Image: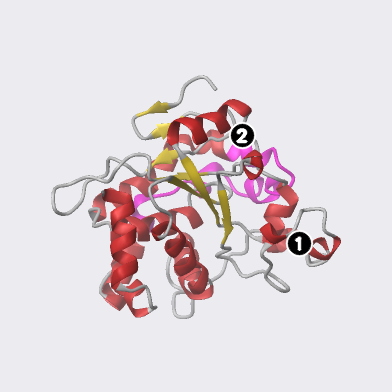
């Protein structure tokens, strides 16, 4: 690992899009704390030095994995799975063909788990769902609203895991660390009273590394087709996408926290998540 941290970015050998959610401004003039929640792209290619930096320097104790069962099985184990001090949790936000599985309850070589992958698994790795009534929204906005519709329980479960995680650091990740991860992080930051503009800016910051990120994913058979059939510009996160999602949440639910409250994420859970990010 050449260096560990520059501002909010963590420069690791095995990831392209890892950064800390610390240092973001809140509506009451405060800031979020460093070393509490990180966001990242896929962790399968972490080096030994990366693992040491995350566990020993950052204090990582929890991985919140938002990928599908197919992605986890096809990409293989993260080296962090071999660290006893790190807990792994799996909350897919995408609809999966067949029965959803707690893939971490079994080894990747388990034949019963592999048997659950559909024959046409490639089409189900990164499905583009659309929430009813949102067909007229831009593609990214449709997908993000779709997570909230199709993956409601796991959206809540991921945030509850962060809220209950204590003082150690957690990393939230998917494949690229921009879409599924972006929605979970936006909701968590909203609970911590981070300003809307800072939430939007954090989401859009992945654009700074998009070329390297697309190249990394294109090198994996799991993601190559999805990366190469569209140009880099179509993969690039745009501030207006997250701004539109926040606008729609404001209109329909009174904001991200309103959406959470009306789906059962209560005051005590909000306070715990806010505390983890801020105190």
Q: SS of the residue at dot 1?
A: helix
Q: Residues within 10 Å of mark 2 (few under 14, many from 20)?
A: some
User: Which residues fall within the magenta stretch?
Assistant: 214-241
Q: Reply yes or no: does residue 190 show up in magenta.
A: no
Tag of residue 165: none
**Residue 3's spot in the image, x, y percent?**
47, 21
Q: Is residue 49 above or below residue 89?
A: above
Q: At x 27% / y 44%, what residue is drawn?
A: 24
CB-based contact (under 8 Å), mark 2 and mark 1: no
Indicate the colouring scheme: secondary structure
Q: Is residue 212 above or below residue 177?
A: above
Q: CA distance from mark 2 to mark 1?
A: 25 Å
Q: At x 23% / y 57%, what residue is drawn?
A: 193
Nearer-the-camera pick, 90 or 128: 90
Q: Is residue 148 above or below residue 12?
A: below
Residue located beneath label 2 in the image: 46
Residue located beneath label 1 in the image: 121
**Residue 16's spot in the image, x, y percent?**
53, 35
Q: Earlier in the sequence, mark 2 or mark 1?
A: 2
Nearer-the-camera pick, 139 or 107: 107
* Residue 19: quarter of image: top left
Which one is closest to the eye, mark 2 or mark 1? 2
């Amino acid at each position: 690992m050449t260096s560990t941290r520059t501002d909010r970015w963590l420069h690791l050998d095995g990831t392209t899009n890892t950064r800390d959610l610390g240092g973001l401004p809140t509506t009451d003039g405060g800031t979020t704390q460093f070393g509490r929640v990180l966001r990242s792209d896929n962790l399968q290619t972490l080096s030994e030095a990366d693992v040491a930096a995350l566990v020993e320097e950052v204090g990582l104790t929890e991985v919140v994995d938002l990928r599908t069962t197919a992605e986890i099985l096809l990409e293989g184990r993260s080296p962090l799975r071999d660290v006893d001090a790190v807990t792994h949790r799996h909350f897919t936000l995408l609809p999966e063909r067949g029965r959803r599985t707690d893939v971490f309850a079994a080894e990747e070589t388990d034949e019963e788990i592999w048997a659950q992958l559909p024959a046409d698994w490639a089409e189900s790795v990164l499905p583009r769902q659309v929430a009813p009534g949102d067909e007229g929204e831009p593609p990214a906005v449709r997908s993000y609203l779709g997570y909230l519709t199709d993956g409601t329980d796991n959206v809540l479960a991921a945030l509850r895991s962060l809220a209950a995680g204590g003082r150690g650091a957690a990393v939230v990740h998917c494949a690229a660390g921009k879409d599924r991860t972006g929605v979970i992080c936006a909701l968590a930051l909203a609970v911590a009273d981070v300003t809307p503009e800072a939430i939007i800016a954090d989401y859009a910051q992945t654009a700074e590394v998009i070329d390297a990120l697309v190249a990394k994913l294109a090198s994996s058979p799991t993601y190559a087709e999805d990366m190469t059939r569209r140009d880099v510009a179509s993969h690039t996160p745009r501030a207006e996408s997250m701004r539109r999602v926040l606008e729609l949440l404001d209109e329909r639910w009174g904001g991200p926290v309103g959406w959470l409250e009306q789906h059962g994420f209560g005051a005590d859970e909000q306070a715990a998540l806010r505390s983890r990010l801020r105190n």
